[in-house]
Amino acid sequence: MDFSSLNPSMRNDIAYDFSPLIKIYKDGRIERLTGTTKLPPSLDHKTGVESKDAVISQEPALSVRLYLPTKSTTNSPDKKLPLLVYIHGGGFVVETAFSPIYHTHLNVLVAQANVVAVSVDYRLAPEHSLPAAYNDAWAAIKWVASHSEGKGSEEWLNRHADFQRVFFAGDSAGANIAHHMGLRVGSEGLSGVKLNGIVLVHPYFWGTEPIGAESALPPIAREYMAGLWRVAYPLTSGSDDPFLNPGKDPKLGELGCEKVLVCVGEKDVLKERGCNYSEVLKKSGWKGAVEVIEAKGENHVFHLFNPTCDNAVAMFKKIVSFIN
């Protein structure tokens, strides 16, 4: 994210200006500046991936989008494929599972990795403050797990998902959520499911004290990251809340998977946190393996906006090999 153009709002009708994501007005009005367009599910002819939506809860309103690689499932109708639960980013405040960038991203990822995928559409802050998004994601994961014996409401999962090869993934705020879902699997268990690994792309983690190159960031960049978190989670204890700073979480060693892949971008303001996550995870007592890959010259979630660039293609290949 480029912070060079950011300035605290001088307009007296705006309470919080987190451009280019969201503006919150003093009268309570919320203006989302991105991520409001939605695409319907489809059969994507370029990738051969079919998608459909499922409502899993009316109260709270909670939906998912499912993805199926039709080439594999048509040729081998009883073959079981790895199952990927994907959680979108957007600072907890914008985007949906139905946004064009995520629909396109999942089509490509599902085709390349040859997986069944479930993309979670959680409630957004500030209308639904955290921990609503965490609770929604866990409810969706438990709904997915309810298919592990082949008796769930969604036939794609009953027929094609291998519940002994399950992966969580997410980008930015979605990576933060995916990490915490892995912790819940470790602490609470998930019947019928084996969580093999988690992919964290440019995870939104933060902390009170600067680490590494963060000390060179302009103050407005640090305040942006801390302030956006406070807006999403008004009852937070601050930037060292374990939900935001894994290094402050005494339960970090309980992560319920065998391996983690962390992707960072060289120019991303969140890069140091992704690298630090690897270090604190290794020291936590967790017994798994963690790997960090860095995309040189790239900014935050570059792959969503330029999915065919060399660095994005390389990152996709790494994620595919991680899953398979």
Image (spheres, rainbow, N blue to C red):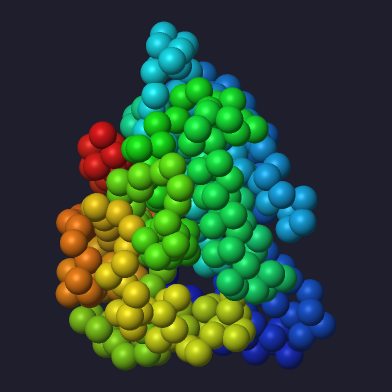
In-image side of 168 versus 89 (left or right): left
Q: Position of residue 16 (x, y in %)?
A: 64, 82
Q: Quarter-wise, where is residue 4 in the image?
A: bottom left
In-image side of 93 versus 2 (left or right): right
Query: Which is more toward the observer, 194 or 76?
Result: 194
Residue at screen point 44% across, 62% down: 188
Q: Position of residue 3 (x, y in %)?
A: 43, 75
**The N terminus, quarter of image:** bottom left
**The C terminus, quarter of image:** top left
| Residue 53 vertical placement versus 185 (above, below) | above
Residue at screen point 54% across, 50% down: 142
Residue at screen point 55% across, 41% down: 146
| Residue 116 vertical placement versus 282 (above, below) | above
Query: Which is more toward the observer, 299 or 316?
Result: 316
Residue 100 seen from this side: no
Q: Quarter-wise, where is residue 262 in the image?
A: bottom left
Q: Position of residue 79 (x, y in %)?
A: 39, 18
| Residue 239 vertical placement versus 60 (above, below) | below
Residue at screen point 25% across, 84% down: 211
Q: Position of residue 290 (x, y in %)?
A: 20, 58
Query: Which is more toward the observer, 184 or 297?
Result: 184
Total marks placed: 0
In-image side of 163 versus 139 (left or right): left
Outermost residue on the right side: it is 27
Residue 274 seen from this side: yes
Outermost residue on the top side: it is 75
